[in-house]
Image (cartoon, rainbow, N blue to C red):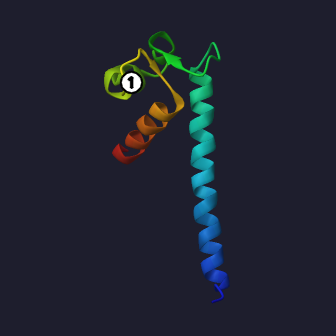
Amino acid sequence: MKMTTMTQTALALLAAGFLTAAVASEDAFMKLDANEDGYISAQEAAADETLHQRWESTDANQDGQIDAAEFSAFESVESTEK
């Protein structure tokens, strides 16, 4: 079954949107990870007021640092609340 040009265009735009969001999230994570160790510490999180305020709920495994997956989940929640 062939996809119509309109369907292909819609799928391409949707994929581009997801890719753009993923890149933006990665950029934000890298900016907060000042020491580039792959984690955001509580001290580094202080640079983002909302992340700092939601530290305990964002640090899902309670290991004292936020990894990329936890940050991505935080960003997802933030985007749905806006």
Q: For mark 1, give the secondary structure.
A: loop
Q: Residue at point 37% right, 47% down?
A: 80
Q: How far across and down, in percent of the image, does residue 74 sit? A: 42, 35
Q: How far across and down, in percent of the image, does residue 29 sit? A: 57, 29
Residue type, mark 1 in image = Asp
Q: How far across and down, in percent of the image, does residue 55 sit? A: 36, 21
Q: Quadrant of residue 58?
A: top left
Q: Quadrant of residue 25?
A: top right
Tell me: 82 left or right of 34: left
Q: Find the residue positioned furthest to the bottom.
A: 1
Q: Tell me if residue 51 comes above or below residue 42 in the rendering.
A: below
In what quadrant of the picture does the C terminus appear? top left
Q: How far across and down, in percent of the image, does residue 6 sit? A: 63, 81
Mark 1 highlights which residue? 59
Q: Tell me if residue 23 comes above or below residue 35 in the rendering.
A: below
Which of the pair 52/67 is nearer the observer? 67
Q: Residue at point 48% right, 37% down?
A: 72
The total number of labels drawn is 1
Which of the pair 64/28 is nearer the observer? 64
Tell me: 40 left or right of 62: right
In what quadrant of the picture does the N terminus appear? bottom right
